Each structure stands twice: as structure tokens, then as C-alpha cells.
Image (spheres, grey):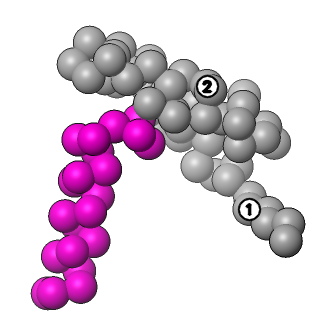
Amino acid sequence: MAVSANLDKALDKAYEGKSVTEVLDAPVAALAGVSDSDAEHLAAAFNIKTVRDLGNSKFFRLAAALADLEKSVG
């Protein structure tokens, strides 16, 4: 089953229309609202350099899981 999604509003202009793999391999600053400075801080603090690194980060995954858990019990 083919799935499609328009992520243009969530991405920097330069990454609009790219494949999911291309976006995952892109620097974190490819995400709309994440500056180059933000990306540098993520790299320094957590060794997060790509969108994939961010999505797979145990810290960010845990934080997202806790936020989801709060929604289900609150």
C-alpha cells in the first residue's frame, strides 16, 4: 500500500519535495524552525547531526513517550 504525506510546511524550503530517506539523511536544520545554531547545539550535546539521529535519539523518544503517556492518563 502506497502512503503519501505533504511535509512541506514542516521542512525548510530546500528540502520540500524530497523523499523521506533524503529528509532523514539531511541535517537537523532541514526541519522548519530548527536553526543552524540549534543544530550545532544538538550535535554538541547529543551527537545529533541528522533528522534520523533526532528521531532515533533515546532522549527525544523517551520525552515523546512520556508526553503521549500523559495524554492517555490525564
Query: Number of marks in the image?
Result: 2
Judging by the rendered image, the residue that carries numbered circle 2 is 26
Vertical relation: 61 (above or below) 13? below
Q: Quadrant of the N terminus?
A: bottom right
- Residue at the spot 27% in from the left edge and 71% down from the top edge: 68
Q: Residue 22, located in which quarter of the rendered image? A: top right
Of the pair 70 and 12, the residue shown nearer to us: 70
Q: Main secondary structure of the magenta part?
A: helix
The amino acid type, in three-letter code, at marker 2 is: Ala
Judging by the rendered image, the residue that carries numbered circle 1 is 5
Residue 11 coordinates in the image, percent (x, y): 62, 41
- Residue at the spot 14% in from the left edge and 87% down from the top edge: 74
Q: Residue 6, located in which quarter of the rendered image? A: bottom right
- Residue at the spot 23% in from the left edge and 80% down from the top edge: 71
Q: In the image, 67: left or right of 29?
A: left
Q: Is residue 73 magenta?
A: yes
Residue 58 coordinates in the image, percent (x, y): 27, 41
